[in-house]
Image: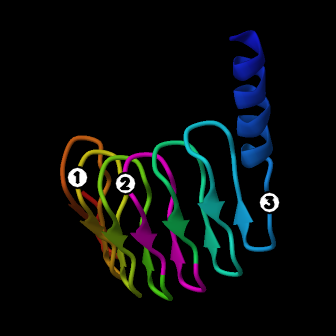
Amino acid sequence: MRIYALIYTLCTVQIKQLINTTTRGDASSFLGVQESGRTRGDASSFLGVQESGRTRGDASCFLGVQESGRTRGDASCFLGVQKSGRTRGDASSFLGVQESGRTRGDASSFLCVQESSRHKR
């Protein structure tokens, strides 16, 4: 019985150590993740996230967030926030706040505050 257990352990270790050019395996929570030119996987809470030219995923609480030219997502408490030319979202207590030329929002006790160039509330 001990010989069979030893053979099984050796085979399992050998399988986990197989690495080719586009696949890498971490022995933490799954056998392997794809790590090709534009795809990387972290072994924290899911199998892999897309990380192409404009898409990145963090392995904290969801599969991935869009990070295109004007959109970024933080993996704290929601899927993603819009961050276009004049809109930014912070992942603290709500989905997003407007942050245009004269409007800014902080996620402390209210949703948004007017902050123009002449008066501040």
Classify 10 Å Cα crowding around label 2: few (below 14), some (14-19), many (20 and above).
some
Q: Nearer the viewer, mark 3 or mark 1?
A: 3
Camera-side residue of 58 and 112: 58
Circles 3 and 2: CB atoms closer than 8 Å = no
Q: Name the residue carrying label 3.
A: 19
Q: Residue at x 50, y 51 (%)?
A: 59
Q: Nearer the viewer, residue 21 or 44?
A: 21
Secondary structure at badge 1 equals loop
Against 66, is 107 above or below?
A: above
What's the distance in space between the residues labelled 2 and 1, CA to CA?
A: 16 Å
Q: Disc 2 residue type?
A: Phe
Mark positioned earlier in the residue sequence (3 or 1): 3
What is the quadrant of the C terminus in the image?
Answer: bottom left
Figure check: 29 above or below 51: above
Residue behind mark 2: 62
- State yes or no: discs 3 and 1 in contact (Cβ < 8 Å): no
Instruction: Report the magenta residues as a range.
Output: 52-67
Q: Position of residue 66 (x, y in %)?
A: 42, 75
Label 3 sits on a secondary structure element that is: loop
Instruction: Tell me if 16 is positioned left or right of 68 in this view.
Output: right
Direction from residue 53 to residue 102 in the image, left or right: left
Residue at coordinates 73% horizontally, 47% vertically from top-left?
15
Q: Secondary structure at mark 2?
A: loop
Q: Amino acid at mark 1?
A: Phe
Residue 94 is marked as 1
Q: Earlier in the sequence, mark 2 or mark 1?
A: 2
The secondary structure making up most of the magenta span is loop
67 and 31: which is toward the camera? 31
> Given the image, on which type of amino acid does mark 3 rest?
Ile
